[in-house]
Image: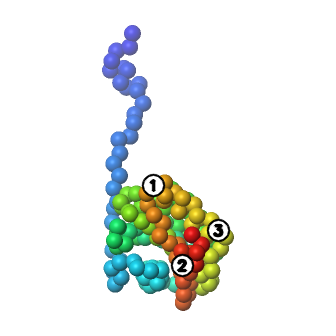
Amino acid sequence: MMKQDEQVTRMKRINVVSLQICKETTFPYSINTIRNPRDVYQLLKMFLGREDREKIVLLCLDTKNKITAIQVIAIGSLNAAIIHPREVMKLAVLSNSASIIISHCHPSGDPTPSPEDIQITDRLKKVGELLGIELLDHVIVGEDNHFSLKENGMM
């Protein structure tokens, strides 16, 4: 018969964890509330600058459309970046977002959405509905302009 001490040492261990958001830095911006896709474009032109590859950015918003967090969630290549809804929603859930806006840059300067842009937008919208976090828009940032999938009836 095994003694209790021997039983405890043979047991497997379970990690006890806690989750928290760690603020890495701050970013000054003049737009207090996101009212339209142009606000997103202006903010991200400053945040991203001129990029040579696609970067996908998540804006987390409170119930009054004020930004509570911003994160680059993926860095891709010249014409593609891969994201998964899990990675997008992780920050949204942790920051208690009421809604989110996804955005990315097209290094070509042409903000026209690709079929993949439209597809991931649809997936994120569905996942957001399940989680109770509304996807308000997907804004593609070009060199001197932007494209809002919501304004153009694509979501």
* Label 3 or label 1, whichever comes before in sequence order: 3
- Quadrant where the image shows the N terminus: top left
Vertical position of residue 72 compared to residue 4: above or below = below
Q: Secondary structure at mark 3?
A: helix
Q: The residue under label 3 is which amino acid type?
A: Glu
Q: Nearer the viewer, residue 113 or 56?
A: 113
Q: Which residue is mark 1?
A: 131
Q: Residue at x 36, y 82 (%)?
A: 31
Give the CA distance from mark 3 to mark 1. 22 Å
Amino acid of disc 1? Leu
154, 59: nearer the viewer: 154
Please name the colour scheme applied to the rendered image: rainbow
The dot on residue 116 is 3
Q: Say few, some or many: other residues with alpha carbon within 10 Å of mark 1 (under 14 / 14 to 19 / 20 or more).
A: few
Residue drawn at (40%, 34%), measured in percent from left and top?
13
Question: Residue 112: x, y in percent?
Answer: 63, 80
Tag in front: 3 or 1 = 1
Q: Are marks 2 and 1 in contact (CB under 8 Å)?
A: no
Residue 16 picture location, percent across and down = 35, 41
Pointer 2: what residue?
151
